[in-house]
Amino acid sequence: MKVDEVRALYLNYFKAPPRNHKEISAFPLVIENDPTTLFTSSGMQPLVPYLMGEAHPLGRRLVNSQPSLRTQDIEEVGDNRHTTFFEMLGNWSLGDYFKEEQLSWFWEFLTKKLNLPKEKLWVSVFEGDGKIPKDETSYFLWRKLGVPSRRIFYYKDNWWSRFGKPDDMPIGEMGGPDSEVFFEFDEVKHDLKYGKECHPACSCGRFLEIGNNVFMQYLKKDDGVFSELPQKNIDFGGGLERLTAAFNNNPDIFKIDVFEKIINAIEKYSGKSYGDNSREMRIMADHLRACVFLADSGITPSNKLQGYVMRRLLRRAALMGMNLNQDLFNTKLFSDIVLTVYQTYGGVFLDETKKENAVEIIYVEIEKFSKTLSRGLKIVEKLERVDAKTVFDLYQSFGFPFELIQEIFEKKGLNLERSAFDRMLAEHKEKSKTLSAGVFKGGLADSKVESLKLHTATHLLHESLRRVLGKEVVQKGSNINSSRLRFDFTYPTSLSREQIKKIEAMVNKQIDKNLVVTCKLMPIEKAQKQGALAFFKHKYGELVKVYFIEDEKSGEVFSKEVCGGPHVKRLSEIDGRVKIIKEKSVSHGVRRIYAIIE
């Protein structure tokens, strides 16, 4: 079965009676005007306001397939199951059905629609941690469905929240236990280096997680204890590529149809076989597929934010290609792969009118990096001694992996000490978790409430600029972290002290009024007809979130703007005064404001 067939089977199953879910459009991979996220990393990410209690216009049962990108596991790519880019199948209950319906429906989908053998399915449930009880309800529901006790495992890690484990969750955050389902490839022999006993969470490759049922039922209270939520939600996520691999009973997800043509092209141009070079080819296939989606989203390689991630992925793919065959840079391989990805996803998620531009973006970056590699190799060849810092500088400046540097130096009769390099790399990764604006771990918002306050203040600032300076003011970009906001806008001259004071006063007047912040989901055309500000239409999906800042008594609206969110619920939560600390020119006709909350 192909990916398209599994996707359609899943969506149709949950849309059919008695489940009656409404299909929602996939959100863009890169959401403009949302400074708290680099990428859409799961289907639930754009739905957080509705999981928190806001009413969704399509009802309380939703389903979709969401293109997603996560970079926190980038070093794991190369095995049989990890990718940075993937499709996430998702279904949600917003305070409607709960554990019994979800587990029975997903079991039916797996065993009767995909016809997966029941004896190959294993499950895990939450073990409890002292504060939250063991999820015995899910255990007994699985037993009722026919899963024998020997195939049900309790794990402490079976917990989901936006911020990780229960102890790491901020006050007022929701979360809950989850129950994962794994497919067993019994022909894969357990590798003892992963432990004496094999089990569903083992990393040996025998088991593949194919779905995670999250039960959002707890709220962290002020005193650090947890209470049951009045609205209990279901948030299911299942990797489409993994489900397809399970159906085909193949433990290698890179052997499903969406990777087949990419791998074939790499074999053709490199003259090497996948069987002998699977790690390099998997990394190339995954990273290049991801970069095609990024190029289609309007991203170009750079040293910041999404562009930095794209550059890193392309360089890793190029390095793997060089390991296979140094002449790959002189072939049409990279262009052919771009066109292959468009053949696979064109008309589904990608805009085929952008494919030539994507080819150009990726070709230019690969060509540029090939020259960087050449310079780096010349430097390496001249070195007569080596230490950890030298190796790390080569890694950071030229993108050389340790194994490549090691191979070069071994030919020169020099030995490398890996432990020191690994320590430096770990420190670098820790510092790089936050690329900018509190963004971390592949997409979810940072844990600092200050960022939400400043994000909402940005909407107030935007509208105040337009009311004071004129409607010709157009947003050109924003960047927010937990200490300040930065806002770029069109205006021909510098702002006077009087104008700045007037803008500040208007912003703070709205805070004093304690206006309410609400969100509504609607088509982009309807949002614009209602006067909502939206200056990045090509980056939005079919349905958009519009945030209204208004007086709930009079109904007077101060600001309405298309935005990815999230925001405070009332302006009193900003808890301070907005102060503009700097205003300057950044380019011809574009000004930049920096502001803080004091």
Image (cartoon, grey):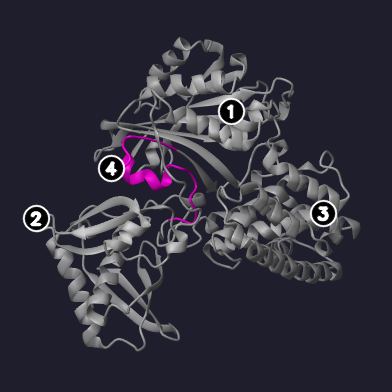
Q: Amino acid at mark 2?
A: Lys
Residue 94: quadrant of the picture: top left
Q: Which residue is mark 3?
A: 323
Quarter of the figure that contains the C terminus: bottom left
Q: Amino acid at mark 1?
A: Ala
Image side of residue 306 versus residue 551, left or right: right
Residue 181, compared with residue 367, is above or below; it is above
Q: Amino acid at mark 4?
A: Gly
The local crowd at label 1, few if under 14, some if 14 to 19, many if 20 or more residues have their Cα within 10 Å, is some
Q: Which residues are magenta?
A: 37-63
Q: Which residue is mark 4?
A: 172
| Secondary structure state at the residue bearing disc 2 | loop
Quarter of the figure that contains the N terminus: top right
Q: Earlier in the sequence, mark 2 or mark 3?
A: 3
The image position of residue 455, as x and y in percent, is 33, 61
Please tell me whether mark 2 or mark 1 is closer to you in this view: 2
Q: Which residue is mark 2?
A: 553
The local crowd at label 4, few if under 14, some if 14 to 19, many if 20 or more residues have their Cα within 10 Å, is few
Image side of residue 3 versus residue 268, left or right: left
Q: Earlier in the sequence, mark 2 or mark 4?
A: 4
The local crowd at label 2, few if under 14, some if 14 to 19, many if 20 or more residues have their Cα within 10 Å, is few
The image position of residue 144, as x and y in percent, is 45, 10
* Distance (Cα) linking label 2 and label 3: 66 Å
Residue at screen point 81% across, 69% down: 374
Residue 201 badge: 1
Q: Earlier in the sequence, mark 3 or mark 4?
A: 4
Name the dominant secondary structure of the magenta segment: loop
Q: Earlier in the sequence, mark 2 or mark 1?
A: 1
Q: Nearer the viewer, residue 10 or 238?
A: 10
* Distance (Cα) linking label 2 and label 1: 53 Å
Q: Amino acid at mark 3?
A: Asn
